[in-house]
Image (spheres, helix red, strand yellow):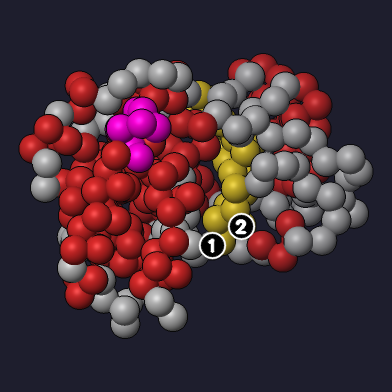
Amino acid sequence: MSLSSLVGAQIPYLRRYARALSGSQASGDAYVAALLEALLADPSIFNREADSREETYRLFTRLWNAMPINGRPDLVKIVTAADSRLEAITPLPRQAFLLTALEGFDAASAARVIGVERAEFDQLVEAAGREIGAQVASTVAIIEDEPLIAMDLENLVEGLGHKVVGVARTRAEAVTLARSTRPGLVLADIRLADGSSGLDAVNEILEIAGVPVIFITAYPESLLTGARPEPTYLISKPFRAETVKAVISQALFFNELARPSQRRSA
């Protein structure tokens, strides 16, 4: 496949990423054009043996980070509320957050794009989460019947600067908690202590108020059958702390409010 085909397929997504980094589509496009000029001048810089999307973003990131001005977060142009939040995230954590939350790279690929080891990348994502938490600090309800897991989730949530308003072990407890506290985010297991459904609990909560929801479950297949809220964030157990932190930051940053499903699960 030609180099133009390999890179060309990535351009619409790269423009989106560049715009998010710079705060301006015009500025972002200028960097994308600079990358294309560099590839025309020396096609050998593109590693054809690598994943083409990962390689395109890697070269763009190398170009972006080579410009000292891009190390100054204060120069991101504020256009929307999301741009304002991005502006407050320091440069490398911002890249780590956008590559995973906006561009859909997994952590290993995103680490290669930025050119850091995986452990350092996880630190960047955690830093982004703390900085996002400082801007959009929220209240969080946890629906989880395993005490140790609930405790782990509480620690992760509070480490990002958010407040846990309570832990519910059953559907009834979860709905009561949501009615009394009106949380800004819900973390929910699916199979609960009394045999009730966390999915049903969430759908009932969403009839009270829209709120971002993240399901954390050992039974992800339960969300693949029957009705479910949309959009749905899903994390499988056993989970990695870094994954939970990244998804919490993503859900609150983009403030995607879930909607109840049209029918209840069995």
Name the quadrant containing residue 174.
top right
Q: Which residues are magenta?
A: 22-29
Find residue 109 and report its image quarter: bottom left
Residue at point 65%, 30% (across, down): 257
Spatial CA span between label 2 and label 1: 5 Å
Residue type at mark 2 is Thr
**Relative to 57, is 79 above or below?**
above
* Residue 191: % across, % down: 71, 55
In terms of secondary structure, where does tag 2 sit?
strand
Residue 56 percent coordinates (x, y): 33, 62
Three-letter code, disc 1: Lys
Q: Residues within 10 Å of mark 2 (few under 14, many from 20)?
A: many
Quick check: is 26 in the magenta stretch?
A: yes
- The residue drawn where x is 61% and y is 57% is 217
Residue 32 versus residue 141: which sits nearer the camera?
A: 32
Where 223 falls versus 208 (above or below)? below
Predominant secondary structure, magenta span: helix
Q: Name which quarter of the figure residue 18 lies in.
A: top left
Image: 49 above or below 76: below
Query: Which residue is denoted by mark 1 in the rendering?
Result: 237
Q: Earlier in the sequence, mark 2 or mark 1?
A: 2
| Circle 1 residues within 10 Å: few <14, some 14–19, many ≥20 | few
The residue identified by callout 2 is: 217
Quarter that holds the C terminus: bottom right
In the image, residue 201 lies at what x, y percent?
76, 39
Assess whether mark 1 and mark 2 are in contact (beta carbons under 8 angstroms): yes
**Residue 128 numbered tag:** none
